């Protein structure tokens, strides 16, 4: 072992200073840091929630280049490790970042608009969806619920399981739409078909469900055939922009995040063409309380082409065609819990995932799920369910008591 | 009686052509028209819902100058009369106008922005509020409910009376806010104090309620004293911009319509300063499904300085301070019914109103109430209740079941 010469001490001081500088940029989270040389120090005076191990000096330079992409990539590659609970660490990091940005408004709004200028073409949308949803049904089956619902669940009771909460979500959506037997429903972005099949089976409607993901459509068709629902539900492999059917009900759960701001008017106009004058629609989407561009790491590795809108930005879907917004519910706490459960289940199968892909992939997904839960927990992401109807549709319900069937 | 010379026929043809031209501009409503000379004709082939009597040629020129202001003023002065049900006539007229404007978006949006540039100063706001709300408490007592609630009621059951529905509205708002005894509530724009007193009396909270209207504040103070609630509720005569208290709950029912687009950020920043980190707020306001400037007649005679926002425009209140929108409910059908009941009650006391002011005033108010009911009935106006909280408030409820107490 070498003696700690003054030159070494200087170098170590410099490394610490660099780390502190980077962490000041993300709002000084209450964490401790351990460097590759064993040096450990706190960032604030408060009790650290977890320790970030930086295992290689290279990670420092990646973090300086882009805190978001750098952290995500270094964590995936194992250059950064979290000693302690990853979920708690991500909550603290997210809280600190957004507390620091608390007052900024026009900057993120402008960057959101600039990001929006890149419209997703049909080709690009197919590519983006393929990137995430065609990872293989076997992969998602490992850690999703039995119905394969990959959107926010609805915990009607605090102690509900994920299976129960996903079922509650499907029914909550159906109740909001007041589905009647024989109605024709168009679903845009149907995942593995759980909602489409639930609507057909339990509410007697006919569903045409669109999806750009080849793997998901294949799986959904198999399931519908196995359940004897082929005549009630048809799955179409295609972009929402190819929807041509007229319908009584339009529903889209977890698709708007992939549409991109520049295509919101197109989506609104399409719904306007499809929906009957006495029809009703529902869009379920991740949202924000304020406009901001997507996280760069998420955009690069998880959801290329994605954009998480504020309600003000979502107005571009509804206002040009004068849709009347009937009801908006924010399910943010439900998505925090959903993601936390997914992470728990994912952790149990992480070795299998690493075998299917590789270690870096498994770590990347672990970070994405922990980060998503943290985003909803801290309020930097919201989950909106928006119910709307043509502006002059007077057959809309007077109250929302039908959504809470215990009252009736 | 003179013979109908060809010159007279020509003149009458010209008058009819002019009327048809004006009515084409407002979308050819299914009405008939009777002129001062007794000529009567239909505008469309369909059964007319009512007949518009134009009793003087002067009215034609007023209508040409400004269809909205012209119609309102001529109706008030008796130069135009509606033979048939005024409510049905206004529904048909409103439907026709907005059907014609169905596709226009950027034009009205631009005019809305231009209108917004005129910010209401403190002085102007006081003047505007005085114009409408200081007409005299005796006037409003004639046709409002006993509690003097001059905002949209909530018809929990279809057969509820106005008294019941206004009480339900107060409780609906209180349930949305989940009021707890001992909490401090700031109310901005409190009318005659019905909500403030209800919150204090039935939910045990302390209320500071602001209002710019001298007459309303005087009345509210008297009522609070009579009910022995002076220590729980204090009424302040002042603009919302003078609010300085910290509070657990911020509520504003029917004020945002008077704030004006240019002051939305000011309002949001004020709420941000007042509201506790674990606080909650509610704004109840008339809205639109799309941006549009106010009706010119309403602006000139009924609500000077008013602006009815779309949800996209309302984002300017919430997004700069990153408030998390928890819940939006559209009570449009409830306001159509509320206004229709007000009109019915108003008609019963119209003679008294004419004695208090004059005949033109009574007719103006009749038209305003009928027009408002028609606007909500046809969907050209909406009524939004927006519940919001600071973005990182995690004490918000998981579901909305508490709003529907039968479920619990």
Image (spheres, coloured by chain):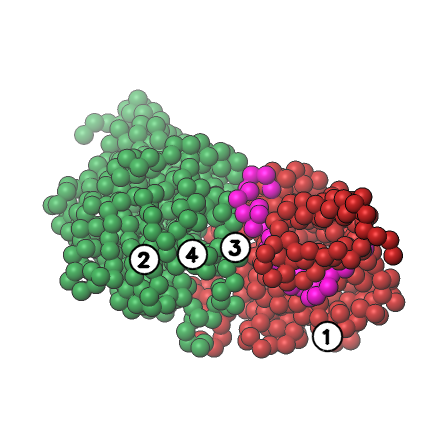
Chain colours: A red, B green
Q: Secondary structure at mark 1?
A: loop
Q: Which residue is mark 1?
A: A146
In reply to whether residue B203 is colored magenta, the answer given is no
Q: Whole-Å distance between the Cαs marked 4 and 1?
A: 42 Å
Q: Which residue is mark 2?
A: B338
Q: Secondary structure at mark 2?
A: helix
* Label 3 Cα crowd, 10 Å radius (few <14 / some 14-19 / many 20+): many
Q: Which residue is mark 3?
A: B391
* Label 4 Cα crowd, 10 Å radius (few <14 / some 14-19 / many 20+): some
Is label 4 or label 1 in front?
4
Magenta residues span: A79-108
In the image, residue B134 sits, relative to residue A72, either above or below, namely: above
Q: Which residue is mark 4?
A: B276
* Label 2 Cα crowd, 10 Å radius (few <14 / some 14-19 / many 20+): many
Is label 3 or label 1 in front?
3
User: Where does residue A376 sit, x and y in percent of width and height?
Assistant: 60, 60
Disc on the earlier residue, 2 or 4: 4
Q: Whole-Å distance between the Cαs marked 2 and 3?
A: 34 Å
Q: Nearer the viewer, residue A245 or B123?
A: B123
């Amino acid at each position: 072992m070498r003696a700690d010469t003054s030159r070494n001490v200087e170098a170590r001081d410099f490394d610490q200073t660099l780390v502190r500088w980077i962490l000041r940029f993300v709002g000084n989270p209450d964490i401790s840091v351990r460097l590759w040389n064993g040096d450990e120090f706190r960032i604030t005076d408060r009790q650290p929630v977890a320790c970030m191990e930086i295992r290689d000096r290279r990670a420092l330079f990646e973090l300086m280049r882009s805190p978001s992409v750098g952290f995500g990539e270094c964590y995936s590659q194992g250059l950064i490790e979290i000693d302690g609970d990853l979920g708690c660490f991500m909550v603290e990091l997210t809280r600190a970042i957004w507390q620091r940005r608390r007052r900024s408004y026009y900057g993120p709004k402008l960057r959101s608009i600039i990001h929006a200028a890149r419209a997703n073409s049909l080709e690009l949308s197919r590519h983006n969806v393929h990137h995430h949803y065609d990872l293989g049904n076997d992969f998602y089956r490992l850690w999703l619920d039995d119905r394969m619902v990959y959107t926010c669940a609805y915990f009607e009771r605090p102690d509900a399981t994920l299976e129960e909460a996903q079922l509650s979500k499907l029914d909550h959506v159906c109740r909001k739409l007041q589905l009647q037997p024989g109605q024709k429903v168009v679903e845009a972005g149907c995942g593995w078909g759980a909602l489409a099949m639930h609507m057909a089976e339990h509410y007697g409607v006919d569903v045409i469900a669109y999806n750009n993901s080849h793997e998901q459509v294949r799986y959904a068709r198999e399931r519908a055939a196995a359940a004897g629902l082929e005549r009630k539900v048809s799955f179409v492999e295609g972009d929402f922009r190819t929807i041509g059917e007229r319908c009584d009900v339009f529903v889209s759960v977890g698709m708007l995040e992939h549409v991109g701001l520049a295509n919101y008017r197109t989506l609104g106009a399409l719904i306007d063409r499809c929906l009957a004058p006495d029809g009703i629609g529902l869009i379920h989407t991740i949202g924000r309380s304020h406009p901001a561009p997507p996280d760069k790491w998420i955009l690069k590795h998880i959801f290329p082409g994605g954009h998480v809108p504020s309600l003000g930005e979502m107005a571009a879907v509804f206002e040009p065609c004068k849709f009347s917004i009937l009801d908006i519910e924010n399910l943010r706490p439900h998505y925090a819990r959903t993601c936390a459960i997914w992470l728990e289940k994912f952790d149990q199968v992480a070795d299998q995932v690493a075998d299917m892909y590789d270690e870096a992939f498994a770590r990347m997904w672990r970070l994405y799920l922990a980060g998503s839960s943290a985003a909803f927990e801290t309020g930097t992401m919201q989950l909106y369910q928006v119910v709307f109807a043509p502006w002059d549709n007077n057959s809309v319900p007077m109250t929302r008591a039908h959504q809470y069937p215990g009252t009736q």
